């Protein structure tokens, strides 16, 4: 079996990281065809990345019998449209997050894929990077003991400070819970398994937001009436852990860690404050506080006693994503190609993405309806990455 032929629909800002990384794995995937709303742009990407063909439309790409997998990099509102169309055309799918704009649409995608025997993968795949795999190893090896709680914090003033076209972040299918939230949610799901129930509160303090990034600097964007730009939730996992989950786009930053998990034997921490350096990147340090480091901090000390700082743990694996500057988006698609060849589930699978979507939707509903919501869907926790 040769490399799977990839058809890419959507060639916005995120595509360059995907395409650059996918070129590193020619034995697994081939950049076969590309399409977007602007045929001239598709032809330019064909020349830049060596696609065999550029299509004039997404529909043309979907009709090509030689495309094995559709990589859907369109905006969130179009994810369902192209994911379901690709599956109807008999093609495997790897989608940018979220899987669809609603849980009902996502379930339809997964049910049709199961009926046709096709794979569905979905970003984010950052949980496959070295740091979150280090979290996973420390949990699986019993270093942490039982995880009883935690906190996840994405606290900033939104994407209008960074993104060249931030308007879609405040429209249907986006907002902090459904846009950047999946990075944090998928990190938690990959470590702790399915969520049992949620409760949340949220607000939308501004109906218009000023854009500070080029090229639209100075313009105002409209916030969809249904979008809450700050939500704070509590997640109860089926494993017993309770996690505070805070997605805030209305704050001028924070000194809180991006993620902590509290075990009976150790605490794991992503300590950096930068909102762009949390579970949404592949690498970085894992800080570990155990009984020994806790004892040094809290017990009486004498002159000459050796300081025991936070330990730093790290694991390397096949993809070696160990630094903040490495953006390995697309390794989930590479893993999907290998999973098809090996006849196993892919790690960044559609079932986990569907569960993430249901939990995200439940957080928003809970905030609007002021009630607890039980989560119906489930998934199997993905296998850990093989260590070197």
Image (cartoon, rainbow, N blue to C red):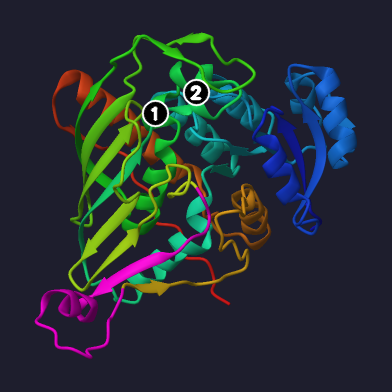
Q: Is residue 288 magenta?
A: yes
Q: Is residue 135 magenta?
A: no
Segment tinted magenta in the rendering: 281-309
- Residue 354 location (% of width, % of height): 42, 37
Q: Residue at x 81, y 30 (%)?
A: 64
Q: Is residue 157 left or right of residue 345?
A: left
Between the residue at mark 2 and the residue at mark 1, the CA separation in whole angstroms equals 8 Å
Q: Quarter of the image for the C terminus: give it.
A: bottom right
- Residue 262 location (% of width, % of height): 22, 61
Does 240 appear above or below 30?
below
Q: Residue at x 83, y 40 (%)?
A: 32
Q: Which residue is mark 2?
A: 160
Does 297 appear above or below 91?
below
Give the residue furthest to the bottom: 304
Q: Quarter of the image for the N terminus: give it.
A: bottom right
- Residue 318 location (% of width, % of height): 62, 68
Q: Which residue is mark 1?
A: 157
Q: Is there CB contact under 8 Å for labels 2 and 1?
A: yes
Q: Residues within 10 Å of mark 1 (few under 14, many from 20)?
A: some
Q: Is residue 328 left or right of residue 283?
A: right
State the residue in front, 184 or 295. Answer: 295
Q: Is residue 262 visible?
A: yes
Q: Residues within 10 Å of mark 2 (few under 14, many from 20)?
A: many
Q: Is residue 77 left or right of residue 290?
A: right
Q: Is residue 16 left or right of residue 349?
A: right
Residue 83, picture quadrant: top right
Q: Residue at x 48, y 32 (%)?
A: 98
């Amino acid at each position: 079996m040769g490399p799977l032929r990839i058809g890419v629909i959507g060639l916005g800002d995120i595509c360059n990281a995907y395409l650059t990384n996918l070129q590193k794995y020619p034995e697994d995937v081939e950049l076969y065809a590309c399409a977007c709303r602007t045929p001239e742009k598709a032809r330019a990407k064909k020349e830049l990345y060596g696609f065999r063909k550029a299509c004039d439309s997404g529909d043309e790409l979907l009709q090509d019998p030689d495309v094995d997998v559709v990589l859907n990099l369109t905006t969130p509102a179009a994810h369902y449209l192209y994911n379901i169309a690709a599956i109807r055309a008999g093609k495997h799918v790897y989608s940018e997050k979220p899987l669809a704009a609603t849980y009902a649409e996502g379930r339809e995608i997964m049910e049709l894929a199961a009926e046709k025997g096709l794979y569905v993968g979905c970003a984010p795949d950052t949980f496959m990077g070295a740091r979150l795999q280090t979290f996973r190893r420390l949990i699986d090896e019993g270093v942490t003991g039982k995880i009883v709680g935690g906190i996840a914090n994405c606290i900033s003033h939104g994407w209008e400070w960074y993104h060249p076209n931030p308007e879609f972040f405040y429209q249907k299918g986006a907002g902090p819970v459904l846009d950047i939230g999946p990075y944090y949610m998928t990190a938690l799901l990959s470590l702790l398994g399915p969520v049992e129930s949620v409760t949340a509160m949220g607000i939308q303090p501004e109906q218009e937001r000023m854009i500070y990034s080029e090229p639209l600097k100075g313009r105002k964007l409209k916030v969809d009436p249904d979008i809450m730009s700050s939500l704070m939730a509590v997640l109860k996992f089926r494993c017993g852990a309770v996690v505070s989950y805070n997605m805030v786009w209305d704050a001028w930053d924070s000194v809180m860690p991006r993620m902590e998990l509290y075990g009976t034997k150790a605490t794991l921490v992503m300590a950096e404050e930068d909102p762009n350096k949390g579970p949404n990147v592949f690498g970085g340090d894992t800080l570990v506080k155990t009984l020994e480091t806790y004892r040094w901090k809290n017990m009486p000390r004498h002159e000459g006693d050796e300081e025991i700082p936070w330990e730093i743990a790290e694991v390397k694996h096949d993809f070696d994503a160990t630094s903040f500057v490495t953006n390995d988006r697309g390794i989930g698609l590479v893993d999907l190609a290998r999973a098809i060849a090996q006849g196993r589930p892919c790690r960044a699978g559609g079932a986990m993405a569907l569960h993430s979507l249901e939990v995200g939707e439940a957080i928003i509903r809970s905030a609007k309806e002021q009630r607890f919501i039980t989560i119906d869907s489930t998934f199997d926790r993905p296998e850990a990455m093989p260590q070197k």
